[in-house]
Image (cartoon, rainbow, N blue to C red):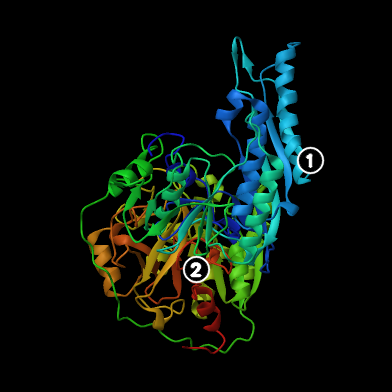
Amino acid sequence: MSDLNITSQKGLVEQFDSSITATTVLYPFGGKTQWTPSIASAHKIFHPSRDTKTVSILSHGFIPELNEQNIFIGAQAAVLESIAKTIAVGGQIKDIFFSFQEYFPRLYEDPKKWGQVVLALLGAQSVQRTFKRPAIGGKDSMSGSFKDRDVLETLISFACSTTALASVMDNVGKTTGSKLYLLDVSKHNDGSFNLEGMLERYQKLEKLIQAKKIKAVHSARKGIAVAALEMVFGNDLGLKIMCDLDVLQARPAALLIETSEDLDETFICVGEITQSGYQIQGLDMDIHRIQHAYQTGLDFLYPVYAETKALKIPTITSTQTTKSYVGPKVDEVNVVIPVFPGTNCEYDTAKAFIKAGAVVSEVVIRNQTAESLNVSIQEFAKAIENSQILALAGGFSAGDEPDGSAKFIVNVLRNPLVHNAIENLRKRDGLIIGICNGFQALIKSGYLPYGELRDLNENDATLAHNTIHRHISAMVKIRQSSSASPWLDANKLGTVHRVPLSHGEGRLVITESQFNELLGKGQIAYQYVDDHDQATLDTRFNLNGSDYAIEALLSEDGRIIGKMGHTERIQAGCYANITDMELQTLFEKGVRHFKGDRQ
């Protein structure tokens, strides 16, 4: 399980933002533990203000072991593997279009090298002809040579398709007692694939999936045992594998299926999902050893978690309340979102507010010339004067460099015109929210936790680099610890939600005296919690290592909230392979606050 071709790539993958634009249907790692790797990309088609029900699917196939033996068969396997993964996540063969990536040694006039190129293309085309699906383009390179060293002949198949949101299926093992079936490959005596047989098998599985008789499908590319283990890792289930097949043999283009149905002889029953424990062909396996090997195989280069502090911290439930809005009832709540160089969450934030019933305006802060900067600052200040809510979106303002993020945003907030507009917003009981980069700007300007613009010193709260010293993109659990804000629902106090993180500098650093002061005033809005819903410094749950597990803070009057978790990215249809993804009411509460709803 620690082999580099098998072990989890979680520490590598989490360095890339996987939830931006709030369109992700299949998160890179699924299940309640987030340890089942997804085998294809599935994203809703983006629209800036509306929900969409159409999903794009992108999968790939690349079998270097077969390429080394026979590039014709390797190319066949690559295309079939991309088809198999598409079917596994709910796509259909009839909707697939291919794009191929080829990479070969420099050809010169060597007929053998030219022959390898022809064989690869013939292998790919043999699948296309049988499955009647076209290639829409690709990328080729014949420059993979340096002196006497050549690259391995390579053909990578990308299968592109669309499907309905309701048809998407994940690959996380789900139910104790479910059976595991193998849809194996069909081959001729010469080792090439029986393509007509593969088409028939895939179409049969498609019909079962459309009839909702299949619970999960995973690629058997790494072998039956590894595929089964990866399926059950996500929901921390067990398995029992009993069959006459070689469970360690790699099986490109084959699929492992979870179902409660009795399938026909096309499918080979290889085992079942159990409550706990791993038993493979009569051998009881050491659960912790297998999980540790799989999870840490790339730790020498891409660790998943930082070292954990052993300190215990309190799980907070604040009894503080917030002041009611006393201004006039507003029928149209206006939200202004500034767009700074490098921020990238404006669309997500705007869509969340629009769904909550607000009218959103965006002001682009243009900084190519001093004149354009001055003009855009004037526009921003005017927009604040005409709004009830100021929302600072996340992203990477000015590239988060040098030495700290959100500096550009803070400088704009300190501009006299903007500062005066924000003060007027505060006087009329307006609200402010900052998420991720926006939270950093609120912290580093003094608006959090003080509720006003301040010059800070080394003893003030700050946001520092994550303890793992890399970008984090993952789901975490947070618990609402206060309701002392118009942004927070008093009925949700103590409620736990899952929320996406995506940041490099999200670790809140505060002193013990600051913590006690914030605690006493009910200014700690959310904490990171473990599987028992307790606040923790364990970096498996508190991924950035924030002091006292603080995810979000409030100003003393509750009208300003800043948080690291991207609540705006929690939208209908997203993260289908993550357990207990519940929509939060943060934006709805903020908007309803001005509409006479004081609940």
What's the amino acid at mark 2? Ile
Residue 374 visible in the displayed image: no
Residue at image location 40% in from the left, 77% down from the top: 557
Snapshot quadrant of residue 511: bottom left
Give the percent coordinates (x, y) of residue 409: 53, 55
Residue 233's spot in the image, x, y percent?
40, 53
Q: Residue at x 59, y 9 (%)?
A: 148
Q: Are marks 2 and 1 in contact (CB under 8 Å)?
A: no
Q: Position of residue 527 (x, y in %)?
A: 34, 65
Alpha-carbon distance for marks 2 and 1? 55 Å
Q: Residue furthest left?
A: 311
Question: Label 2: which residue?
Answer: 433
Q: How many badges with numbers are in the image?
A: 2
Q: Which residue is mark 1?
A: 129
Q: Secondary structure at mark 1?
A: helix
Which is more toward the observer, 66 or 426?
A: 66
Quarter of image, res 191:
top right
Query: Mark 1 or mark 2, which is nearer the start of the sequence?
Result: 1
